[in-house]
Image (tube, rainbow, N blue to C red):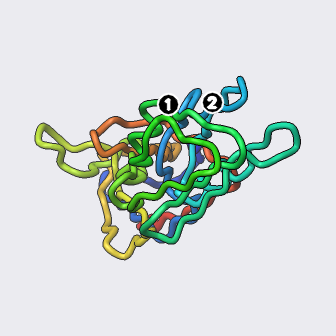
Amino acid sequence: MAERRIPVDSITSASQVRLKYFHFPALPLRDAFVDAVVFAGVTKSVEASSSIYEIVGQLDALVSGGNRVLYAWYDDSEIEICTAAIPVTLSAGFAAFLKMPTALAANTCYSSSLYESVVSEYSHYAVCVGHVRGFFDGQGYNEVIAKIRRDGDVSNAHSHFFRGPISSLELKVTAVKRDGTVSAYTSPEIWSLGLQLT
């Protein structure tokens, strides 16, 4: 999980913290589509992904009897899926996401316009530091010191004061969905971020 506790000295209410850099995997695009694709009596899920390209890769990898089931392409604005020799059924949710019918006939191509900025389920990463006066959320100050959107830009991060003296720095990164739901984030790879303490 993207959470750490780091021992520190001399942190008081006059101390400040600011995010300097943020090197994380790409922000998730969508959660998994469970039982999304059915072909030849086989049901497959589409795993959680950070891009439409990753989804295309998963669809391209589907095989039945050693033969490919689908051929998929994406060009940043349009997705095209062509079935091979067997028909394919998509779950209602996955079909709605792709803007395609649920029943895909054999040896047929389908396409639709699809933009990651529109279909992304996630809004941003939130970098939280315990005992900090973060952003005002309408009722009080939370512990969020920075929000990192899909472009990864941290140039607008500013300093936040601590609420009082601390002996360990509690650091946590969460993924926030567009509907405001906060999810604990578990990174699939090594991550790093830099904090400036003054």
Q: Distance from label 1 to label 2 (Cα)?
A: 8 Å
Give the number of the disc on residue 38: 2
73 relative to 42, above or below: below
52 relative to 102, above or below: below
Q: Local crowd at mark 2 within 10 Å, few (<14), some, or many (≥20)?
A: some
**Place of residue 15 in the rendered image (x, y in percent of width and height, measured from the top left):** 36, 59
Judged from this view, the residue extending furthest toward the left is: 138
**Place of residue 126 in the rendered image (x, y in percent of width and height, measured from the top left):** 39, 50
Query: Does the rendering let one see residue 115?
Result: yes
Position of residue 106 in the picture relative to residue 29 (left or right): right
Q: Local crowd at mark 1 within 10 Å, few (<14), some, or many (≥20)?
A: some
Q: What's the residue type where badge 2 is placed? A: Val
Q: Which residue is mark 1?
A: 91
Q: Check if mark 1's residue and mark 2's residue have beta carbons within 8 Å.
A: yes
So how many labels did they put on this image?
2
Q: Looking at the image, which residue is at 34% across and 68% down?
A: 157
**Place of residue 45 in the rendered image (x, y in percent of width and height, measured from the top left):** 62, 33
Q: What's the residue type where badge 1 is placed? A: Ser
Q: Looking at the image, which residue is at 60% across and 39% down?
A: 46
**Place of residue 190 in the rendered image (x, y in percent of width and height, measured from the top left):** 70, 55
Give the number of the disc on residue 171: none
- Under circle 1, the secondary element is loop
Judged from this view, the residue extending furthest toward the bottom is: 155
Q: Nearer the viewer, residue 12 or 82?
A: 82
